[in-house]
């Protein structure tokens, strides 16, 4: 590509120059009519119960995304993302250091602003607790949603602790944010009580034994056409694919398996998404950040695919 040719994304960037936004996207908070989706970072990890460091996750994911910018059409998609979807990087939410209450208020308010403008929000974390204020914002627009949750942990710990990245999905059904009976968790491989668990669990052993097609068919049968919040905790992946996280658990999905599943989700009515729990300090060769960046990019392609399907009628 010559210097005079336009790049597939908005910023003048390469794999090593100007790599401060996700995929070299324009850095903008102008929610203009032609913008379809927004990428927002939340550098927060004060609800972490294991190893800290996910506050650096958004920056790590953005940096690693520079390795994905050279492909105009992301394999195996048949179109370039920019042909169908206009995406901006909203930057990070800035809150007073140590002030979790302010973080929650700002995240919910900014998410509400983005969704009120009719944009789809993709959030980069940060610890998984951030999903709770995001769900609160999304529920104001969509009512109780189905949750599609990829994780090693169910995050349904019955805790009344104000900040705990292991109890968001204990509180979310109680607050009417998600419909637990229409929600699915994929990759679970830690303790929970099946007798008192309303969400459908496709545990890591089951997921590893079945094809991506079978997994998505099961997901679709539970969720149907409901509005979906898609949340991906990077520790859903096996530590061999994602060592850079706070609570790694052996026996997870490969990055390839996860990508195959995500690519097949265009039939779902996804209204908001996130990728959480990347802790670059524990990473090796940026493999975790790269996996997270790739998953995030695939999520945007899924939105573009669904938009294209609707355009064709």
Image (cartoon, helix red, strand yellow):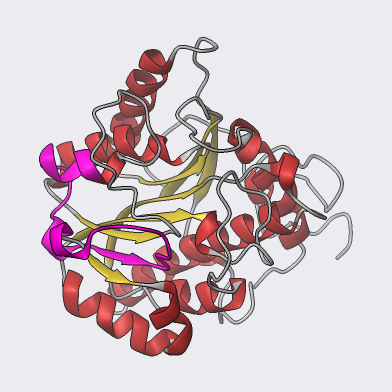
Asked if 310 appears above or below 249 in the picture, the reply is below
* Quadrant hosting residue 295: bottom right
Across and down, in percent, residue 112 comes to 28, 31
The residue under the point 64% across, 78% down is 75
Query: Which quadrant of the figure has residue 164?
Result: top left
Residue 93, compared with residue 177, is above or below; it is above
How many numbered marks appear?
0
Question: Range of the magenta residues?
Answer: 170-197
Left or right side of 153 for 61: right
Question: Residue 62 or 78: which is nearer the viewer?
Answer: 62
**Residue drawn at x 39%, y 36% as measured from the top left:** 129
Q: Depth check: give the residue in front, 51 or 231.
A: 51
- The C terminus lies in which quarter of the figure? bottom left
* Above or below, 189 relative to 276: below
Q: In this view, does 229 lie above or below 111?
A: below
Q: Which of these two is toward me, 213 or 82? A: 213
Is 183 in the magenta? yes
As for residue 254 lying within the magenta part, the answer is no
Residue 65: x percent and y percent?
70, 53
């Amino acid at each position: 590509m010559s210097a005079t040719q336009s790049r597939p994304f908005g910023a003048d960037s390469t794999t090593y120059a100007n790599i401060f936004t996700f995929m070299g996207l324009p850095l903008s908070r102008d929610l203009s009519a032609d913008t379809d989706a927004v990428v927002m970072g939340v550098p927060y990890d004060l609800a972490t119960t294991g190893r800290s460091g996910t506050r650096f996750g958004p920056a790590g994911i953005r940096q690693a995304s520079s390795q994905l910018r050279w492909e105009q059409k992301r394999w195996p998609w048949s179109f370039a993302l920019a042909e169908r979807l206009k995406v901006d990087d909203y930057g990070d939410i800035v809150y007073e250091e140590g002030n979790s209450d302010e973080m929650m208020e700002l995240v919910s308010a900014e998410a509400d602003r983005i969704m009120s403008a009719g944009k789809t929000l993709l959030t980069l974390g940060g610890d998984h607790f951030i999903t709770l204020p995001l769900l609160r914002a999304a529920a104001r627009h969509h009512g109780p949603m189905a949750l599609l949750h990829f994780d090693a942990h169910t995050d349904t710990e019955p805790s009344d602790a104000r900040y705990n990245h292991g109890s968001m999905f204990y509180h979310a059904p109680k607050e009417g944010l998600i419909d637990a009976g229409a929600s699915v968790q994929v990759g679970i491989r830690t303790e929970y009580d099946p007798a008192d668990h309303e969400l459908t669990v496709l545990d890591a052993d089951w997921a590893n034994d079945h094809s991506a097609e079978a997994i998505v068919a099961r997901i679709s049968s539970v969720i149907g056409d409901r509005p979906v919040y898609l949340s991906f905790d990077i520790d859903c992946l096996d530590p061999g694919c994602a060592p850079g996280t706070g609570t790694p658990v052996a026996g997870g999905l490969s990055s390839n398996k996860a990508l195959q599943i995500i690519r097949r989700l265009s039939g779902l009515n996804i209204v908001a998404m996130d990728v959480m729990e990347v802790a670059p300090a524990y990473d090796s060769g940026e493999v975790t950040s790269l996996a997270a960046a790739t998953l995030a990019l695939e999520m945007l392609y899924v939105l573009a695919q669904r938009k294209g399907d609707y355009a064709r009628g």
